[in-house]
Amino acid sequence: MTGAAGRDPEFSRAARERGVDTAAWERVMERLDWDVAPQELWRPGEYGGEWFAGGRLNVSVNALDRHVDAGHGDRVAMHWEGEPGDRRSLSYRELLDDVKAFAAALRGLGIGAGDRVGIHLGWLPETVTAMLACMRIGAVYSVLPAPLPAEALADRLAAQQPRILLTQDGAWRHGTVMPLKARADEALTAIDSVEQTIVVRRTGMDVAWYEGDLWYHELAASGAAQVRREEEAGRAASLPSGAPVCTVSLANRGGRPASTVHGNAHLAVSLLAVHGALRPQDGRVFWCAGDIAWAVSQFSGVVGPLLRGDTPVMYEGTLDVPTQRRAWEILARYRVGTMVTPPSVLRAMRAWHGEPPDVAQHSALQKVVTAGEAVEPELQQWIRDALGGAGGDALQLGDAWGQLQLGGIVVQNGLSPAEPIPGCGLDVIEDPGSADGRGEAVLRLPWPGSIRGVEGEPAEEIARQWTRLGEGLYATGDLARRVPGGQAGTGTGPDEAAQTAQAAVSLEFLGRKDDVVSISGQLVSFTEVREVLLDHPFVREALVTVRPDARLGRSLVAAVVVAQEAAARAATPEGAENLAIDLMNAVRELLGGLARPRSVVLLDRIGDDLDPDRRDQAIAALAAPPPGVVRRLSWEQVRAAGQDAQS
């Protein structure tokens, strides 16, 4: 496409007037192959505005075809490792062939632009192939967490209404096999939209078979044969900049499911910009050590590296199988240059190995980037000592922040990249009367990765994040305060207005303003957890709070008042512990492991004579310390502890 020197000045006028670093974004934009060049960099509109208006491209082409056409088809596009120890590495040419074949297969099933596809798979090569094949034909995919039980999976499918569902016979998880196909079959009894279920044979376990079920390998082979006969069958659709390419579920707001809708070029440009800062100095090997259902894994762990022609590493299972050396072995085996992960993974590695195993000496690690929550200084020092090897001082530690509504990571602190992330104007609107400058974090500048829509009841509430604090401000819902130094929100603006808007601001994030909390990098809704507890027949009242956790950073504590008919059963220590475990399991089954309370407090009543913040702090402080799971308290004990803390 035409470079900046030959472009009409009107192309970026509106963006310049808003203080956007237009030169930086144009440089990123020009790295991509466009079918039709955009007519305008940015213009005002919903969700922070419209970027690249009039432009058309395909993310799959830019992630694969572009590199093959440039002569890099033999470069490794991904290293994949299964929990049992099986491994596969695919070149860019091989991955492109797989994507074309599956794209042709989806077209053969009548799937096209705008159709929905559910991907209920773990970290598999087929997962990446399916994502890119959907992007190739314009279908809109959604990754559904593999551990979801049937009821929760049915809720997600009912909200998203996919025509096709991908699942697998079974999925390896912590040395055991989860029956994904059986769960999907149960969920589909309540769903009318799904026309075919495509099944990946991963474990070889026996599964029930129904009308509309198709084996992935047979379908892919058929698609490959079709592409060999007619290359056009694997063609890429030319999609508008804002065309939807995927949806991602948000933490439920007040029990109301919602999904964010992410746009074509919007996502591609922002992910390419972010990856430029996160990638190792020599490029190439990049590992996002998080579940594939985590948006950071999908976006910055897969799409971002492939857009740049680098090599992402993907691991299927948990990092303590077959031994607790697994993470170190992956780092050394693939010569990983950058590791991106939620801090909980690093806390687990520290708990397993205070001192790193011998294999750590063979690491090529240059950067460790944490995302999803803050990292305590003790963990930062351990990362330097354990992952930096003899040259620990040379290891760069980055702290990334972003939101799903913004398309993932937006800013980072700590790295010194050759390609800084263009500025977003991250700042704080201080609360009136705040003694320490805390308030709500905001973005003062538009960001191209911002969502293109929201599906579900909370849509209007989420859309208001771009308007409720005033024109041109995105309200994050995160509490924060400014701290000296740092690079968050910085950029190299083309003029004084842009430089002022992007002045260096570093923030300390202090939690959320709403009823969700980040646990191990994923948002969990207090309301959702409380509703699950109240659905239990033995619970009359319930509340949920949070406390520090040595492994997860923070974890949930549930406080419940036992129903009168169950009081006798819960009166003994054994009965109380059984009830607590039952409640924990109920939350885990419906909402997943990160939402499971790690401790349960049994109260005689929940009074209204204590400030809610003091109440929650007191309950968290009085809850049974690990490894205990339950503690019986009176409301008077909670009230006394809350009043003592206040005084």
Image (cartoon, helix red, strand yellow):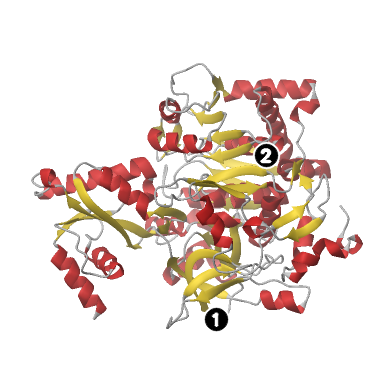
| Residue type at the position of mark 2 | Met
Q: Are marks 2 and 1 in contact (CB under 8 Å)?
A: no
* Category of crowding for the residue at label 2, using alpha-carbon neighbours closer than 10 angstroms: few (below 14), some (14–19), many (at least 20): many
Name the residue tied to disc 2: 135
Residue 351 visible within the image: yes
Q: Going by the image, does 417 lie left or right of 315?
A: right
Residue 459: horizontal and vertical position, in percent?
53, 50
Tag 1's secondary structure? loop
Residue 403 visible within the image: no
The one nearer the camera, 223 or 281, is: 223
Quadrant of the rendering where the C terminus is positioned: bottom left
Quote the CA–CA distance across marks 2 and 1. Answer: 42 Å
The one nearer the camera, 190 or 88, is: 190
Q: Give the mark, 2 or 1, whose residue is nearer the N terminus.
A: 2
Question: Residue 423's quadrant in the figure?
Answer: bottom right
Q: Is residue 48 above or below residue 644?
A: above
Q: Going by the image, does 570 lie left or right of 182?
A: left
| Residue type at the position of mark 1 | Pro
Question: Residue 215's quadrant in the figure?
Answer: top right
The one nearer the camera, 171 or 50, is: 50
Q: Is residue 5 above or below residue 579?
A: below
Question: Which residue, as the protein is rendered here, is positioned at the far right?
Answer: 6
Q: Residue at x 31, y 68 (%)?
A: 613
Q: Residue at x 20, y 54 (%)?
A: 630
Residue 622: horizontal and vertical position, in percent?
21, 65
Q: Residue at x 47, y 80 (%)?
A: 437
The numbered mark at residue 484 is 1
Tag 2's secondary structure? helix
Count of labels in the image: 2
